Image (spheres, rainbow, N blue to C red):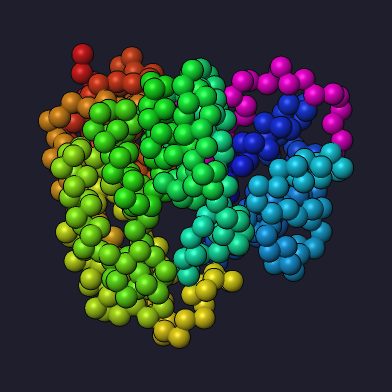
Amino acid sequence: MGCPKALVDSERILTRLRAEGYEVASSYRAADLVVVNTCGFIDAAVDESLQAIGEALAENGKVIVTGCLGAQPQKILDRHPQVLKITGPQRYEEVLASVHEHLPPKHEPFIDLMPEQGVKLTPRHYAYLKISEGCNHHCSFCIIPSMRGRLVSRPIGEVLAEAEKLVRAGVKEILVISQDTSAYGADLNYAADTWRGRPRRARFHDLAAALGELGAWIRLHYVYPYPHVDEVVELMADGRVLPYLDIPFQHASERILKLMRRPAAAEKTLDRIAAWRKAVPEITLRSTFIVGFPGETDEDFEALLQWSRAAQLDRVGCFEYSPVEGAAANALPERAVPDEVKRERRERFMELAAEISAERLADKVGRTIQVLIDRVEDGTAFARSASDAPEIDGMVRIAAAGTLKVGEFAQVEIVAAGAYDLEARPVG
């Protein structure tokens, strides 16, 4: 459950269990035991996780709970005291030990029977690559550092070795994820490893450059706009990584950003965006925002709308502020924004975002672009361009799919555009 980072955690647990001879069941009732990997970031995610635990208990009865909500075990036990075990995020060994205790393996592990890339929960042609755990930021609305700890980067040699295995297994797109991708390696003092006969430093730029040698699409998520991000934009200009940046700006009012404990320089951010687009005209910028943060006034919200009109971001998500137990924002003296005002602001914000998206997508009509085919149904192919991350962005529909196959690249001409999606036809 939750974000792609939790999905990667699930993949790691499944890989270890499959290596020991366990199999994945198709339903709760068909399983001998259920592991629920939870999310605990916002109240809605907590409720969804607790509901999933309840469903697993009702259908199966033997349930182990892990993930971010596991860092708050009493909250789980208050609702579901009968769970077998609760572990926090990244506690892979504890999960495995609990599985062994309640469902011992039937035979010794045969590691060589596992696919080299391990078990993946994504389609064969794309995969998430987690490069670090934890976060050193102290955003007032967030409790991720208290659940996942401070930044812990993986050695660059280990990351690149995993990426190579993924590409050898047929992965065409690697989505780089973490809590703070652009801080990668800071905790390692940017230590170097040897890869392909050359030393590679554990730096964001060096990692992106090395990944760009693999011949796959490299998509960068959760990037904070530190100055050195400009160096990675240069790699995009050279075609070594996808011209796509996922940057969580969160707001544009300097007053609200300060209350959030976020960088508060909206004008400089607009200058950065302009510079990136000058260097890479085709760059796609995605971000998420929070409306209704405690103390947000009409003037603060209007500042966000004005900034959004100026920024012209390609892909945008927006959430109504939800208090999270343990977050510093709970202690702010600022007045809470009424729920109906939050909803109205989110609706207005997303209406503007849809208008901007539609205008930017309309400019692509008549162009020929490369897409990656995600699925084919009843003669129609559903694909993604360099501008589209799976699950969260738009898609490219190709009505006359012909011989197009899932997991392959194709050249298509854009023939129509909507608010978020494109229509295309095959070329050649």
Residue 124 percent location from the top left of the image:
50, 25
What is the tally of numbered marks visible in this picture? 0
Q: Nearer the viewer, residue 387 or 49?
A: 387
29, above or below 164, in the image: below
Q: Quadrant of residue 20?
A: top right
What's drawn in magenta, residue-wise? 103-131
Residue 119 percent location from the top left of the image:
62, 29
Regarding residue 418, the answer to whether it shows in the image is no
Secondary structure that dominates the magenta span: loop
Give the left or right position of residue 359, taking residue 350 as reference: left
Q: Quadrant of residue 398?
A: top left
393, above or below 339, in the image: above
Residue 116 lies in magenta, yes or no? yes
- Which image quarter is the C terminus in? top left
Regarding residue 192, the answer to whether it shows in the image is yes
Residue at horizontal 48 percent and vertical 68 percent from the top: 141
Residue at horizontal 70 percent and vertical 47 percent from the top: 91
Residue at horizontal 85 percent and vertical 23 percent from the top: 108
164, above or below 96, in the image: above
364, above or below 320, in the image: above
Give the left or right position of residue 78, taking residue 206 as reference: right
Residue 73 percent location from the top left of the image:
73, 62
Residue at horizontal 48 percent and vertical 60 percent from the top: 137
Q: Nearer the viewer, residue 362 or 120?
A: 120
Q: Nearer the viewer, residue 205 or 267?
A: 205
Q: Nearer the viewer, residue 110 or 156?
A: 156
